Image: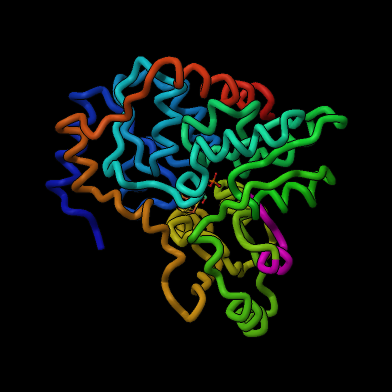
């Protein structure tokens, strides 16, 4: 279904008037991806937020992403179309409980996945995303033990890839843990030529079935670089919109959730709509605001990540 032309025109007029840049994650609805100035994975979006010359950043993604943009570009106005667009991983890791966890492991380096709040980032030595986690952990001194939070599934995968022992915080993504192993096995039988590609937030038994594992951007690029013509895609289905444009002649198979539910659409990401995007450009709200001492503490481990990422 194509977007309402009047709505699109209003967004285009407002983004010029506000000198705004619209950043969107691949899990946004197709109409938002189509109107964005830049689409990317968490790492690419952070880099863009840190380097943009715009006065206003409209972050079409979830709260921790917009918060990261504000941490990196405090002088900019950062708005999120729906302030309730959270993330189960960030919600599963309260700052005070995390402080207790750190206190129990005082000699550990703390590596936190970017899917966490600013208050958890501020207690971390290094931030990572799904696209650089293995590479960053490999760069840490071999004699230092590591705490990894908040995604235990990503942590387990990093552990296997790096050979480093990680002490894991028990968080999980409510979207990626719903994929059905039975459905993937059936799809593999029906499509023996297909490659299974998966986001590392999936459960270990699903990752064991994957031919390729990576961040959203890496999955997207892989559909282009692989000679395969069929892919069983184990991540949020918003990514299929870009995949269909990059590889229009290939077959992309979306995997249902447990019991055939469509719970593999992220309920937080999907709170953002074109109407809310227009409204936040109009009113410059809801804005991301943060205490300066928290912001500067959270900035240090993100900057470290950007410097260490190749
Ligand atoms: P990416 O960094 O791969 O874009 O992942 C973000 C995310 O929230 C996945 O659920
Ligand atoms: Fe968070 Fe999972 Fe949604 Fe990504 S897909 S934003 S990890 S709840």
Q: Nearer the viewer, residue 88 or 222?
A: 88
Find the magenta span and give its range. 205-214
Q: Position of residue 307 (x, y in %)?
A: 65, 21
Residue 224 visible (yes or no): no
Q: Position of residue 274 (x, y in %)?
A: 23, 48
- In the displayed structure, does residue 260 sit left or right of residue 279? right
Residue 223 visible (yes or no): yes
Q: Position of residue 136 (x, y in %)?
A: 72, 33
**Residue 213 in magenta?**
yes
Q: How is the image coloured?
A: rainbow
**The C terminus sits in image quarter:** top right
Q: Splitting the image into 4 quarters, where does residue 130 fall?
A: top right
Q: Nearer the viewer, residue 133 or 210?
A: 133
**The N terminus sits in image quarter:** bottom left
Name the residue rendered at 73%, 41% in the picture.
Answer: 134
Name the residue rendered at 49%, 41% in the picture.
Answer: 94
Name the residue rendered at 62%, 42% in the picture.
Answer: 149
**Residue 262 in magenta?**
no
Q: Nearer the viewer, residue 33 or 264?
A: 264
- In the displayed structure, does residue 114 sit left or right of residue 278? right
Q: Residue furthest right?
A: 143
């Amino acid at each position: 279904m194509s977007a309402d032309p009047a709505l699109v025109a209003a967004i285009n007029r407002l983004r010029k008037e506000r000198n705004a840049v619209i950043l969107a994650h691949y899990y946004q609805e197709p109409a938002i991806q189509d109107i964005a100035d830049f689409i990317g994975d968490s790492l690419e979006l952070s880099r863009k937020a840190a380097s943009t010359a715009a006065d206003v950043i409209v972050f079409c993604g979830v709260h921790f992403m917009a918060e990261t943009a504000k941490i990196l570009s405090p002088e900019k106005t950062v708005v999120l179309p729906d302030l309730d667009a959270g993330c189960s991983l960030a919600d599963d890791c309260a700052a005070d409980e995390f402080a207790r966890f750190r206190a129990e492991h005082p000699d550990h380096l703390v590596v936190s996945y970017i899917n966490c709040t600013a208050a958890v980032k501020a207690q971390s030595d290094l931030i990572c995303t799904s696209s650089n986690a293995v590479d960053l952990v490999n760069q840490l001194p071999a004699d230092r033990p590591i705490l990894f939070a908040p995604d235990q599934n990503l942590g387990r995968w990093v552990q296997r890839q790096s050979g480093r022992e990680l002490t894991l915080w028990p968080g999980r993504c409510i979207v990626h843990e719903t994929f059905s192993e039975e459905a993937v096995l059936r799809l593999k039988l029906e499509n023996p030529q297909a490659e299974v590609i998966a986001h590392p937030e999936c459960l270990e038994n699903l990752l064991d079935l994957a031919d390729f594992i990576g961040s959203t951007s890496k999955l997207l690029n892989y559909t282009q670089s692989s000679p395969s013509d069929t892919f069983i895609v184990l991540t949020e289905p918003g990514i299929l919109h870009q995949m269909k444009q990059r590889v229009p002649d290939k077959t992309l198979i979306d995997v249902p959730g447990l019991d055939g539910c469509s719970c593999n659409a992220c309920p937080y990401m999907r709170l953002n709509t074109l109407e809310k995007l227009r409204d936040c450009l109009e009113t410059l709200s809801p804005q991301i605001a943060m205490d300066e001492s928290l912001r500067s503490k959270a900035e240090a481990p993100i900057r470290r990540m950007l410097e260490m990422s190749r």
